[in-house]
Image (spheres, coloured by chain):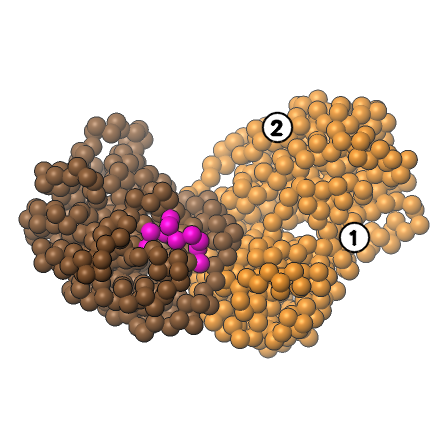
Amino acid sequence: MLKTEQSKVDIPRNPGMPLELDYIKDIKVNRSAVERRAKTHPSRRSIKKQWQAAWLLKAITLIDLTTLAGDDTEERVKRLCRKAKQPVRKDLLEQFDLGDMRITTAAVCVYHNFVKTAVEELRGTGISIAAVSTGFPSGQISMENKIKQIKASVADGANEIDIVISRAKVLSADWHGLYEEISAFREACGEAHLKTILATGELGHFENVAKASMVAMMAGADFIKTSTGKESVNATLPVSLVMMRQIRAYYRMTGFKVGFKPARGIRSAKQTLAWLSLLKDELGDEWISPHLFRFGASSLLGDIERQLEHNLTGRYSASFRHAVS
Amino acid sequence: MEVRKIMESMEYGPAPESRENADKWLDKFDRKLKIFIANEWRDSETYFDSIEPGTGKVLTQIAAASDKDVEDAIQAAKGAQQSWADLGGHGRARYLYAIARQIQKHQRLFSVLESLDNGKPIRESRDIDIPLVARHFYHHAGWAQLMDEKLKDYQPLGVIGAIVPWNFPLLIFSWKVAPALAMGSTLAIKPAKLTSVTALLFAEICKNVGLPSGVINIVPGSGRTVGEYIVNHPDIAKVTFTGSTEVGKHIRKSIAGSGKKSTMELGGKSPYIVFEDADIDSAIEGLVDAIWFNQGQVCCAGSRLLIQENIAKDFIEMLKQRMSKLRVGNPLDKAIDIGAVVDKNQFNTIDHYVKIGEDEGGSKFQPTISCPDEGFYYPPTLFTDISPADTLAQEEIFGPILVSMTFRTPEEAVKLANNSRYGLAASIWTENLNLALDIAPKVKSGVIWVNSTNLFDAAAGFGGYKESGFGREGGIEGLYDFVKPK
């Protein structure tokens, strides 16, 4: 979307609230019912023709284009930023009669070492810079160092911080400790938005996911995010449903809207439609915005581009016809 | 619509399933479907219109069977029965497997025809009705093979008269046909007058797989003529009926003293019980499958919502929100939740009950969602402020109408749940295993679902207590209704 339009949207930031332990303890999630809903949902919502094209273009504006690899270099990150600025081939946009619309991804997501590179590369574009932090992906470093990492990334110009929680605190039901930890992260973030990675694949079961989601929001998370991409199980539709429902519960309770970011595991254009329609049906249209929803993905964009071209021509193009990041 | 505008609104667009092959199939018969007796299509002097509920237009005409046609159908079935039984379980299983495979092969055609004819969403006919039909034939093919071993002291009944309702035209058809064939009986079947189309496609498939002549005979027409003739015929060994309690009672009176066996799967007013410790979001989602499945035209629909008093206020508020996300529209659209009710009469019946509910002081809620102008679309409706004494709490509406009441304790939940002349199904929602296991056997229902609803399988017997009927369909318990001791 046009960045000027985007910045007009004024969604009050979640200030958090005192931890309500009784509420957390009462959270119930029925696994088989959740799985059934998640399994049947994609078969209940089919999006075709120009609607599909529009939804996929919208999906691009919700992507946190990500590179989090040991072999990342400055040049690699620059390439990623260029792709974020120009994610779809111009001739395709023109055929959709969107030649004048500036479509970019919502953010790029990198390690702390590349925040400066990204800031320079994306200056004036309105694209956010997200840094993973607090001992990403495992979180197994001291609290002191976690806070230092957040502050360093914010100082370098990151405006979104993707933190990881201490899974041990969830597994030992130390909700108070988790609340304190995330509250401290939020404070360290200052103006930067706090995206809380729950690492759902390591939390054992849905009830823990739901409880950790609620604690994170009570502690002031701006976004809750499924996973780092480094766990063996990352974003699934059932786990996303559990988190979306907690976001809805928090909104009912406080009136504040918290964002959701499924990360890793969403690789096809078709999957994005399942996630967006679930988001629309569970949370509502206002969540389909970069302020309240992100796809954490690296290879997804390529499949969306191919699907968009298919939408125009009826044929799938080879992947080499679309620029890589 | 422009891509740019959709990007702003992020609305759903139409996503229709193609009806081309279904239209071609109907055109092959010049939209005049015939009676099926002894593997032959038979013409009739009179044809009746079959309406497409999604548009209100005529879908096809169907031959109405005369008394002579029904007589011939029963005689054909009688003539074929002994050799069908003599074929043995393994021999019959070959045909059942062949039918199951053909249903899978033509699954798309069956689904589209079912949605056109009945008005149910294509998602349901595609993902639920037709796959379950195939499953029933596979399952019962297995039972045919096991008959000599597991039912060695039993023998086939003879000629079965089957009367099928319009809400699950082919699914309930197969609940009757598959076990009958497996156990060595033959049939004369009357599909519902409103929805005969898929039964006739099924007949074509039987012909194609070479099912022996006379084993299956399909006689479309009204209950008053065709149904009466079947029920009262001396050569009928058993009547298997699914439909209203009123007609069920009438059939039972007709066959009293005749020695005919019967299975009656009748009405319901099934309770949907939500305890305070349930996963509320999931319980609300379950209601979508309970009462807005097939437009609520489901005998086991969870139409009586019983909520524990202390969570009722929040529950109802969240339920109303969920209802506002339901999409009502063209049954062939792959992105709708609720299609069209079966015909104008049913629409009026539902509307009549809704007016009674309002007159008796119930609070009606209907979300502001759009319904198509043409066709028979009834919006999802919730009634609160309802008590057991109200008409809406007692009568089966057979539409997308949910009535809600509250209870204070588990004992009271059971009391309210059983305070009905029906006893078909019940859903219980709690995360407390002990509570679920305590309550389930106390609720007098043929089927109890815990933390789920409207789940069916060929291996699980289905049927009711009290005015919901008797006999079971599916599983080994269902087989005993299709055999007699040697």
**Would you place residue B371 above or below residue B25 in this image?**
below
- First in residue order: circle 2 vs circle 1: 2
Question: Disc 1 designates what residue?
Answer: B470
Q: Position of residue B297 (x, y in %)?
A: 62, 54
Which three-letter amino acid code belongs to the residue tagged 2?
Arg
Visual hue assigned to chain B: orange
User: What residue do we see at 9% from left, 58% from top?
Assistant: A155
Of helix, strand and loop, which one carries label 2? helix
Q: Position of residue B416 (x, y in %)?
A: 67, 70
Chain in brown colour = A
Name the side, left or right, on which B42 lies relative to B454.
right
Which residues make up the magenta segment? Answer: A198-207
Q: Which labelled disc corresponds to residue B409?
A: none
Q: Residue furthest bottom?
A: B361
Name the side, left or right, on which B287 lies relative to B243.
left
Q: Position of residue B454 (x, y in %)?
A: 60, 52
Q: Position of residue B88 (x, y in %)?
A: 80, 25
Chain identifier of the residue bearing label 2 in the image: B
CA separation, marks 2 and 1? Answer: 31 Å
Say which of B475 and B8 sits in front.
B475
Q: Which labelled disc corresponds to residue B101?
A: 2
Query: Is-magenta flag for residue A206?
Result: yes
- Give the crowd class for mark 2: few <14, some 14-19, many >=20 residues within 10 Å: some
Toward which corner of the image does residue B352 lie, by quadrant?
bottom right
User: What residue do we see at 82% from left, 55% from top?
Assistant: B250
Say which of B206 and A76 sits in front.
A76
Visible in this render: residue B464? yes
